[in-house]
Image (cartoon, coloured by chain):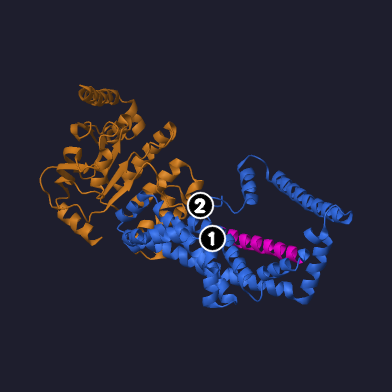
Chain colours: A orange, B blue
Amino acid sequence: MTLSTQLREIAAIPSGGANVAIALDHVEKHFEDQQGNPIPVIRDITLDIREHEFISIVGPSGCGKSTMFNIIANLLEPSAGSITLRGSHPIRGAHIGYMLQRDLLFPWRTILENVALGLEVVGVPRTRRLAMSREYLERYNLADFADAYPHTLSGGMRQRVALIRTLITDPDVILLDEPFSALDYQTRLVLEEEILSILKSFDKTVVLITHDIGEAIAMSDRVAVMTQRPTSVKRLYEVGLSRRLGSCLKARSDPRYQTLFDQIWADLDIQMGGQAS
Amino acid sequence: MSTASLYTRRIEVSAGGTKPRKHQDHSLWKENLWRLAIVAALIVAWQFAVNFGWVNAFLMGSPAGIAIEAWRQLQSGQLLSDTWTTLYATIVGFLLGSIGGSAAGLLLWYSRHVARIIDPFVVALNGLPKISLAPMIIIWFGSGMLSKVALAFIATFIVALLSAYQGTHQIDANLVNLMRSLGATKRQIFLKVVVPATLPWIISAFRLNIGFALIAEIGGEFIASDKGLGRSIFVAGNLFNLNAVWVGVLTLMLVAIALYLVVSRIERYLLPWESR
């Protein structure tokens, strides 16, 4: 906690240009197979994730997005290169909140206890953490489910709870890894909107990892398109449709949406062709 | 996870459907009526067969004889004292073995290294029919209750240990990673993820262990004992007193059912999220 406030103060000093939240500098990652031969997964990623932006990482399936996720989430060390949070090196000690395709709510805890998990781990006293969690649930209209167990909630509701559980701990950066892919299309559209508005109210830096081009364009300020494995950043798009238009649905019906979709689609297509040759 | 019994599973299935609640109660009542009818028919048929000489009462016993014998044993207090002796030794051995084994299995989560080293020993002990240890245990602990407790303990410990340890291996790594991302210590991960996630495995080991504890306890009584249902069955069998054998067997059945119900109750208390 104290470390992250310290970091925040350092970050407040203007460093010229847009503030960078996370900087990936020539990050590489390879794994080893049974014979000990290196299998490259990430060839070279250099990417600045700006403070308060919503950036999407789009890439073909199996391109190494999850490995990238794990490196940013601090679950894996890069084989080479560096990753820094607000200029501090290394990223360890930063608090990265994340949300996956599966909500990862603890089935043995009620919704309220699930939301309070992060506060419990850092030692916030019981009455305070439960009061805080209840307040958060109320703000997002989930108070009625506070004492229910997760299995009684729909997939979309569980994802909202998972996001609130992440936000209540006030993470430096929020990582979303295909958070909507287990949901049906309608729920997805509604949830995109809701998640975005929740995130906006917290003004967080968000990294969304997805293979859904439409979702990336509808939600993001920027989209980074990745190559096939071993992956690197193929192209960066400035989008910002939902931020300017105020909603994901409006972003989806904007003419620029289709243009971007075609361009990104083409980027991915070229790589498939490229790999085949 | 598996539910308390076939009986409650049935209720669950119909509760999941669209049937109204009244209908359920009705069908449950009907099912019980059928069960009662089957038991009654069996008793009547058995008694008739004995009365008409189709079945040898000396070799098979008879319902009337069993009832008389049960009444005699109740009056003399022998039945209650035998039941209490068996129940007590079984429960103490069962609890020590199941709780101790589960705790040991959980703690192995802390060290993969230790777990790997002791793995072959656990496997060897698990394969061994624990009742084969009875003569030795009786030499060490005597023919009284202590040796039966020890046997029930040994029979349940390894099962609980293996089940709990396997349970810790089935934990979703994402839950552990989530705890790490929140800055949790290993101890916090153990208490807040490993223990609750393994509880269903522990409970299912408890359920199996009722049977194992009873087998070990009764086996021990067969070999050397001064009291208990196992001894009563063994002695009555040697005297060809089949009615008394039946009294012992039927009482044991009631004991097993009672223990089973207790574990189901504990399960509902410990796993409220699993009872829908």
Residue at 53%, 76% (x, y): give it.
B139
Quarter of the picture containing the C terminus of chain A is top left
Q: Secondary structure at mark 2?
A: loop
- Mark closer to the observer (1, 2): 1
Q: Position of residue A98 (x, y in %)?
A: 32, 47
Q: Which residues are magenta?
A: B244-267
Label total for image: 2
Give amino acid for label 2: Ala
Whether residue B69 is in magenta: the answer is no
Report the front residue among A28 and B144: B144
CA distance for labels 1 and 2: 27 Å
Q: Secondary structure at mark 1?
A: helix
Chain bearing tag 1 is B
Whether residue B246 is in magenta: the answer is yes
Q: Is residue B147 above or below residue B124?
A: below
Q: Which residue is mark 1?
A: B206
Residue at 48%, 55% (x, y): give it.
B201
Q: Position of residue B214 (x, y in %)?
A: 60, 64
Report the front residue among A105 and B261: B261
Give amino acid for label 1: Phe
Quarter of the picture containing the N terminus of chain A is bottom left
Q: Which residue is mark 2?
A: A148
Residue at 26%, 38% (x, y): give it.
A65
